[in-house]
């Protein structure tokens, strides 16, 4: 019986087991190449991230399987990144670049979780514009993203096919990196409307904007925990890129990564017990994961 | 160690009898009067009356055009569509603020000076690159493929190379860490010898994190060892002997010969390899290509190299646009600055300044960080910044440059200089002046001085 139990425990993905006592981050990748936006599948078995390839001239989207193997998500030759799993885990929304001289055109596209062809969705009416950082609503009925199609980078939502577009933000500066709360009632994002980049939240129709951070140095890349109680984000307030945690109302801010190397782009594991992030602590950039105290 | 110095003496001095005899002999060898004058300049440089402030220069060439607003000329009080999402931070120098992505440099601001009023006449990468590297628009080729009038001038590095005596068996005086510069698929001119000839083109080395130090385009193919390469090279030399009379062929033959020696000698290559540095030193520069190239530049300078240029990238474009990560960020600008360029530049340059200083090299090494232009103060419709040649910034350190000083100023939105406008020709004249190269030396090799040294920078 004990043997069977041991085997079963061994099959459980690391972040589904009990948190280890040592909170030191665990390194998930070892190639040292620059990484962009890690994102877990809903079952916690697959990890999507983009990688800038050796020589720096390609950005490609990968999926890390439960056994640690890597596979490319598409066979595209042009840049691609920012892929995030749909709530049902069957597909991903990804940013695909169509090169056009020196004015790359960035679109949102869908692709099967098993990989293959991408299908662009039309949220900008075919304009040469930049749609980035897609984020699924918890029920999968909408996506939030940033777009420049109206002349300034703003946050929008739409149905996953690009229809029924709604503008969420209206400021003369930069609004970026949206993230839904688990109940779907608010969207967190980064904005420079008060000076440097800060984290704010708004209702999906853009009303009731609330400022969550107020610090020297940028605050960016908010990621709401699966239970909706906390937010991981990157901050430069110490003069160093660190992953911070705060309560959903902006209180109780603390440095989670606390390392002189660059730590950034946090995302939660689906069980809410760990945070995965990009760190340069032992290479230019690799993915790490660390336990978060309940 | 280095044969650089300032010439002092009569400029109308005639040739000596010995030199006349030498020119006769030189003529037999195919040398010209210009070669003789260069020889005289070199001889004079070899025996300087007074030691110039700099014995070496490291140019950090920020290809693609960094934004002055996010680096050295922030405008926190400008409207949001100008100032951008990053804040300015205080530095070690009271009253001096720079972009928040450069905290390491902020802590070292007492060691460098800034020029905030750089400007020139073109916002085309190709033309601007030529202007910045040569101080002149002559011969520049833009994106449309059209060449500007008059002959291409030599780069500052080539001038230094022309006036510097190489030690036997050493690298040529002018080394670039990086591939030839490109805008899209077009090669950019201005890094080479120009009117001085291809003999004074740079010798190129490069470093890639996965590949180590290498000679671009001349790496040993898989399965080819040094012995087999030497054999192949012998065949190549034999076939080239008949057509090696043209200057370009001679220059190419010289380049290949140097490359052959370097590649064939694992020891020579290893001596330049940053992996021989202690891990702690390597880590300070950062694990990325640019950081490690800055470390190699320090090693080269320490070994007596007079002019090293580190190219940030080959292409102006980023990987999002089929480039290799240049500073030409028309879109995704603020994300890329945060995720890549800001910390990479800050870490590498901070480490370089520390390293040079701790070895006593900073006082004799001029460090210059600059690109071909700045970026539009008003953020564009793609959340990026476009080309802006009307105003940008440069950083200089070491070799008598006054730390903490700011020369020139831009207006409230960083659009135009409002005080002490400075041109690339002035910047290049400053580099040469620090090396003891002035009017006399330039005219001795058939060049006309352009630009004036920025005296306000000096301590």
Image (spheres, coloured by chain):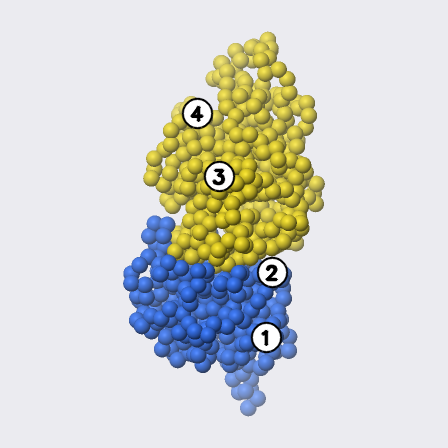
Depth check: A122 or A13 in front?
A122
Give the secondary structure at mark 2: loop
State the separation of the CA atoms marked 3 and 1.
Answer: 47 Å
State the separation of the CA atoms marked 1 and 4.
Answer: 71 Å
Q: Which chain is blue?
A: A
Depth check: A193 or B344 in front?
A193
Q: Which mark is residue B390?
A: none
Residue lying furthest bottom in this view?
A: A1
**Disc 1 marks which residue?**
A251
Query: Are there few (<14), some (14-19), or many (20+) residues within 10 Å of tag 2?
Result: many
Q: Which mark is residue A240?
A: 2
In front: mark 3 or mark 4?
A: 3
In front: mark 2 or mark 3?
A: 3
State the separation of the CA atoms marked 2 and 4.
Answer: 52 Å
Q: How many numbered dots are placed on residues in this image?
A: 4
| Tag 2 near tag 3, CB within 8 Å | no
In front: mark 2 or mark 4?
A: 2
Query: Residue at position x 70%, y 45% from top?
Result: B358
Establish whether labels 3 and 4 are both on one chain. Answer: yes
State the separation of the CA atoms marked 2 and 1.
Answer: 21 Å
Establish whether labels 2 and 3 are both on one chain. Answer: no
Q: Quadrant of the N terminus of chain B?
A: top right
Query: Residue at position x 38%, y 32% from top?
Result: B148
Q: Is residue B265 visible?
A: no
Q: Chain of mark 3?
A: B
Q: Give the mark nearest the N terminus, 3 or 4.
A: 3
Q: Chain of mark 4?
A: B
State the separation of the CA atoms marked 2 and 3.
Answer: 32 Å
Q: Which chain is yellow?
A: B
Give the secondary structure at mark 4: helix
């Amino acid at each position: 019986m004990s043997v069977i139990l041991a085997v079963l425990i061994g099959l459980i993905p690391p972040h589904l087991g009990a948190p280890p006592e040592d909170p030191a981050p665990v390194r998930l990748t070892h190639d040292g190449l620059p990484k962009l936006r890690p994102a877990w599948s809903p079952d916690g078995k697959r990890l999507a991230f983009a990688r800038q390839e050796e020589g720096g001239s390609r950005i490609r989207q990968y999926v890390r399987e439960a056994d640690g193997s890597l596979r490319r998500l598409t066979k595209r030759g042009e840049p691609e990144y920012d892929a995030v799993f749909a709530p049902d885990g069957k597909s991903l929304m990804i940013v695909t670049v169509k090169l056009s001289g020196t004015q790359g055109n960035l679109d949102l596209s869908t692709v099967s979780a098993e990989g293959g062809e991408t299908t662009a969705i039309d949220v900008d009416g075919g304009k040469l514009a930049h749609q980035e950082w897609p984020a699924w609503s918890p029920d999968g009925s909408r996506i939030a993203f940033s777009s420049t199609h109206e002349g300034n980078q703003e946050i929008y939502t739409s149905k996953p096919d690009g229809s029924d577009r709604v503008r969420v933000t209206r400021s003369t500066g930069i609004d970026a990196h949206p993230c839904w709360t688990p109940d779907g009632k608010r969207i967190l994002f980064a904005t420079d409307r008060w000076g440097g980049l800060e984290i704010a939240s708004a209702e999906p129709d853009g009303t009731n904007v609330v400022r969550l951070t107020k610090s020297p140095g940028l605050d960016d890349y908010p990621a709401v925990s699966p239970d909706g109680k906390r937010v991981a984000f990157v901050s430069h307030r110490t003069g160093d890129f660190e992953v911070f945690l705060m309560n959903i109302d902006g209180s109780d801010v603390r440095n989670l990564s606390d390392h002189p190397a660059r730590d950034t782009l946090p995302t939660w594991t689906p069980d809410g017990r760990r945070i995965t992030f990009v760190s340069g602590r032992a290479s230019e950039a690799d993915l790490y994961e660390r336990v978060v105290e309940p | 160690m280095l044969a650089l110095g300032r010439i002092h003496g009569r400029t109308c001095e005639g040739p000596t009898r010995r030199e006349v005899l030498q020119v006769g002999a030189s003529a037999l060898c195919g040398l010209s009067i210009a070669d003789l004058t260069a020889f005289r300049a070199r001889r004079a440089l070899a025996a300087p009356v007074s030691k110039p402030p700099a014995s070496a220069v490291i140019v950090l060439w920020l290809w693609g055009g960094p934004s002055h607003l996010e680096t050295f000329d922030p405008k926190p009080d400008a409207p949001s569509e100008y100032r951008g999402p990053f804040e300015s931070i205080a530095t070690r120098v009271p009253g001096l603020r720079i972009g928040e992505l450069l905290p390491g440099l902020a802590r070292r601001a007492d060691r460098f000076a800034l020029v905030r009023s750089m400007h020139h006449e073109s916002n085309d990468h190709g033309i601007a690159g030529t202007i910045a590297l040569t101080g002149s628009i002559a011969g520049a080729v833009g994106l449309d493929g059209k060449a500007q009038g008059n002959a291409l001038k030599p780069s500052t590095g080539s001038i230094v190379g022309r006036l510097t005596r190489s030690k036997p068996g050493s690298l040529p005086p002018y080394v670039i860490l990086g591939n030839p510069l490109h805008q899209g698929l077009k090669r950019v001119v201005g890094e080479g010898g120009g009117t001085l000839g291809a003999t004074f083109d740079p010798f190129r080395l490069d470093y890639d994190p996965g590949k180590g130090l290498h000679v671009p385009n001349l790496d040993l193919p898989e399965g080819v060892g040094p012995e087999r390469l030497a054999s192949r090279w012998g065949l190549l030399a034999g076939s080239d002997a008949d057509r090696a009379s043209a200057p370009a062929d001679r220059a190419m033959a010289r380049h290949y010969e140097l490359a052959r020696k370097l590649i064939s000698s694992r020891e020579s290559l290893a001596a330049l390899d940053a992996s021989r540095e202690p891990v702690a030193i390597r880590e300070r520069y950062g694990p990325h290509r640019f950081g490690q190239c800055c470390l190699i530049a320090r090693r080269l300078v320490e070994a007596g190299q007079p002019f090293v240029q580190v190219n940030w990238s080959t292409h102006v474009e980023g990987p999002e646009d089929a480039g290799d990560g240049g500073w030409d960020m028309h879109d995704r600008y603020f994300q890329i600055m945060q995720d890549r360029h800001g910390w990479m530049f800050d870490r590498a340059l901070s480490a370089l300044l520390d390293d040079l200083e701790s070895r006593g090299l900073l006082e004799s090494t001029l460090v210059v960080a600059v690109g071909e232009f700045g970026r539009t103060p008003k953020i564009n419709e793609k959340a990026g910044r476009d080309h802006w040649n009307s105003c940008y910034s440069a950083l200089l350190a070491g070799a008598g440059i006054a730390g903490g000083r700011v020369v020139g100023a831009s207006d409230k939105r960083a659009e135009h200089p409002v005080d002490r406008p400075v041109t690339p020709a002035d910047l290049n004249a400053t580099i040469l002046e620090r090396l003891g190269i002035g009017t006399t030396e330039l005219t001795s090799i058939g060049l006309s001085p352009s630009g004036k040294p920025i005296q306000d920078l000096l301590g």
